[in-house]
């Protein structure tokens, strides 16, 4: 599996780009239809038709007027077998996180986090207006403040999308979200070295019961299940992403012995690491032929 880095469409680009989805589904079929990892963010908006995008090995159906947020470093396989139209916005941390306040906002937004599960949202009149304004601004003849204008529109788009999701969240759910998000951030930073729930409870200075209750309320998993699922996800990514052997992946993920890793992976997925890689490779070949 390849990893893609943001390539500026021209020398004066500011690490933000808008493409038509038809360009992906028609021009770059073999490249974009295969699983790949990108170091930038994607926002997909389908205008007409229906597509099934695959993110971190999970198929996600998108229909008319739906928007999908994909974080950097997620594994993506674009739908190149069906006909649909819309746009995709690509941008990097360098473009959006212009100061610490925007970096914090990116973390706070419930758009690119472990709990949304890349759940599509339905567009609204305000979101459509902001989206169209970004497209219009992007296609303007370049001028000195164009990057700032697009950044402001993207920031407003994020806030409106996040507000749209938050409207359906109660205060109780919000409290659960804050605890769960803190736990998820710690897991993201330490999952290769810390596997015990108690290790994270100590870091959070929290107790087990509120943490377990919060995670169950937000994503329906226990803390242990969440930790295990993060390790499995990274294992899957590495199995199809790089050229490392199963042994090398096992050590990279903090396992003392490759056999322990193989046993853990089979318990979580029902198949061995080698079988998973072979199965996925066959599925990719079938989908592109």
Image (cartoon, rainbow, N blue to C red):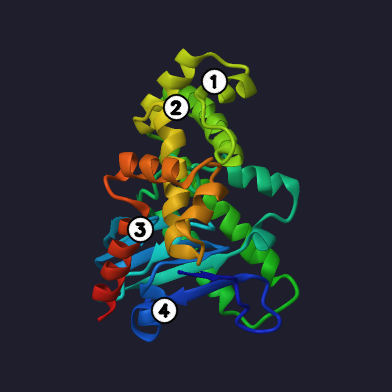
Q: Position of residue 115 (x, y in %)?
A: 43, 39
Q: Is residue 97 above or below residue 203?
A: below
- Residue for point 59% across, 54% down: 155
Q: Position of residue 268 (x, y in %)?
A: 33, 40
> Which of label 3 and label 1 is nearer to you?
3
Other-residue count near label 4 (Cα within 10 Å), few / some / many at <14 / 14–19 / ≥20: some
Residues 251 and 237: in front is: 251
Answer left or right for 149 relative to 191: right
- Residue for point 58% across, 24% down: 199
Q: Is residue 132 above or below residue 112?
A: below
In space, the residues marked 4 and 3 are separated at their CA atoms by: 23 Å
| Numbered badge on residue 31 | 4
Answer left or right for 66 relative to 160: left
Query: Which structural element holds mark 1?
Result: helix
Q: Is residue 212 above or below residue 146?
A: above
Marks 2 & 3, CB-CB < 8 Å contact: no
Q: Quadrant of the C terminus?
A: bottom left
Q: Position of residue 37 (x, y in %)?
A: 49, 64
- Residue for point 43% across, 59% down: 239
**Of callouts 2 and 3, which one flags the residue occurring earlier in the amino acid sequence?**
2
Q: Which residue is mark 1?
A: 198
Query: Which structural element holds mark 3?
Result: helix
Q: Which residue is mark 3?
A: 274
Q: Position of residue 209 (x, y in %)?
A: 45, 13
Query: Which structural element holds mark 2?
Result: helix
| Numbered badge on residue 223 | 2
**Of callouts 1 and 2, which one flags the residue occurring earlier in the amino acid sequence?**
1
Marks 2 & 4, CB-CB < 8 Å contact: no
> Which of label 2 and label 3 is nearer to you?
3
Residues 246 and 169: in front is: 246
């Amino acid at each position: 599996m390849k990893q893609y880095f943001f390539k500026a469409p021209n020398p004066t680009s500011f690490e933000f780009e808008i493409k038509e989805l038809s360009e992906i589904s028609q021009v770059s079929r073999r490249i974009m239809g295969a699983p790949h990892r990108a170091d930038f963010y994607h926002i997909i908006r389908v205008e007409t038709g229906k597509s099934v995008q695959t993110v971190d090995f999970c198929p996600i159906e998108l229909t008319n007027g739906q928007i999908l947020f994909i974080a950097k470093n997620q594994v993506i396989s674009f739908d190149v077998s069906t006909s649909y139209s819309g746009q995709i916005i690509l941008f990097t941390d360098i473009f959006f996180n212009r100061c610490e306040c925007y970096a914090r906002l990116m973390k706070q937004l419930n758009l690119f986090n472990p709990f949304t599960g890349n759940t599509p949202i339905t567009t609204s009149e305000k979101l459509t207006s902001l989206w169209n304004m970004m497209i219009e601004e992007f296609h303007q003849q370049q001028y000195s403040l164009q990057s700032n204008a697009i950044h402001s529109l993207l920031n407003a788009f994020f806030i409106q999308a996040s507000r749209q999701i938050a409207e359906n969240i109660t205060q109780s759910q919000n409290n659960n979200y804050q605890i769960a998000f803190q736990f998820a951030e710690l897991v993201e930073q330490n999952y290769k070295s810390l596997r015990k729930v108690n290790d994270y409870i100590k870091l959070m200075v929290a107790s087990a019961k509120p943490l377990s209750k919060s995670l169950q309320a937000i994503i329906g998993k226990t803390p242990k299940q969440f930790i295990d699922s993060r390790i499995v996800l990274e294992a899957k990514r590495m199995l199809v992403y790089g050229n490392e052997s199963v042994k090398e992946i096992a050590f990279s993920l903090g396992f003392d012995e490759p056999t322990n890793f193989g046993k853990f992976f089979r318990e979580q997925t029902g198949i061995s690491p080698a079988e998973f890689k072979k199965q996925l490779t066959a599925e990719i070949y079938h989908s592109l032929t």
